[in-house]
Image (cartoon, helix red, strand yellow):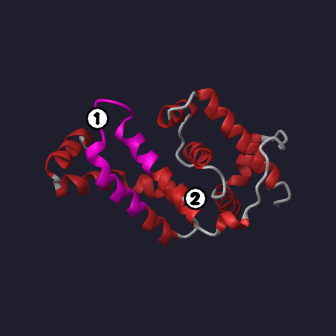
Amino acid sequence: MDELRLIKKIQRNGDRAAADELVQCYYDEIYGFVRKQVSNADIAIELTQEIFISMLRTIGFYDMKRGAGFRTWMYRIAANKVVDWFRSRAYHAMTKTISLDEVEPIDEADFTRQFENRDFTEKICVFLGGLPPDTQKIFRLHIFGGYTFSEIAGIEGLPEGSVKSKYYRLIKLIRKEFADYG
């Protein structure tokens, strides 16, 4: 696939076949990113569709010569849509506000093992929904998208140290919040 060729066709004349091909190229990857965070497959499909609709509506603003690559741009849209979805739900009313200064060190390997548990993942995602969007995006891009801190820094336009700091503070907060989780 020559994604730049497809993007140009879509931007120049709204080429439907090029749009379909571009969506097909990224659909499974973006759906997987969303599905890891949303427990309901139907909601994950709906969100994925919203992500691609948003991409197609805004592709005219995507500049191939500047900024991040197309895949990174897609993940930025996806992370924003997932954050918006969790923030729009009643989930945030169920979460408690906790000061980020009241956290303790964690064993990150243990946290990763717990995160593989689907129920635990769902509870984390609900909890994340009540946090600031920038913090959510960093976590979601790193954990669910597999992006490095350096890549996230580029996506979000933040210094890498700030990204790491926010991420590790959030990990400590999550660990504290879910300390009693089996």
Foreground of the two, 154 or 36: 154
Q: Identify the secondary structure beneath mark 2.
A: loop
Q: Specify the principal SS of the magenta part.
A: helix
Q: Which mark is residue 64?
A: 1
Q: Amino acid under label 2?
A: Gln
Magenta-colored stretch includes residue 71: yes
Q: Residue at x 15, y 45 (%)?
A: 12
Give the residue pinned by disc 2: 37
Residue 150 x, y percent position in the rendering: 54, 29
Is residue 153 left or right of 112 when viewed as pictured? left
Q: Residue at x 29, y 47 (%)?
A: 59
Is residue 25 left or right of 14 when viewed as pictured? right
Q: Which mark is residue 106?
A: none
Residue 106 x, y percent position in the rendering: 81, 41
Q: Residues within 10 Å of mark 1 (few under 14, many from 20)?
A: few
Q: Residues within 10 Å of mark 2 (few under 14, many from 20)?
A: many
Residue 78 x, y percent position in the rendering: 46, 52
Q: Identify the secondary structure beneath mark 1.
A: loop
What segment carries the magenta color? 48-77
Sequence-wise, which precedes: disc 2 or disc 1? 2
Residue 1 x, y percent position in the rendering: 25, 43
Q: Amino acid under label 1?
A: Met
- Dividing the image into 4 quarters, which one contains the C terminus? bottom right
Is residue 70 visible in this depiction of the protein?
yes
Magenta-colored stretch includes residue 147: no
Asked if 159 appears above or below 176 in the picture, the reply is above
Foreground of the two, 100 or 28: 100
Is residue 109 visible in this depiction of the protein?
no
Q: How far is the residue under mark 2 from the one under mark 1?
A: 29 Å
Does the residue at mark 2 contact the one at mark 1 (Cβ under 8 Å)?
no
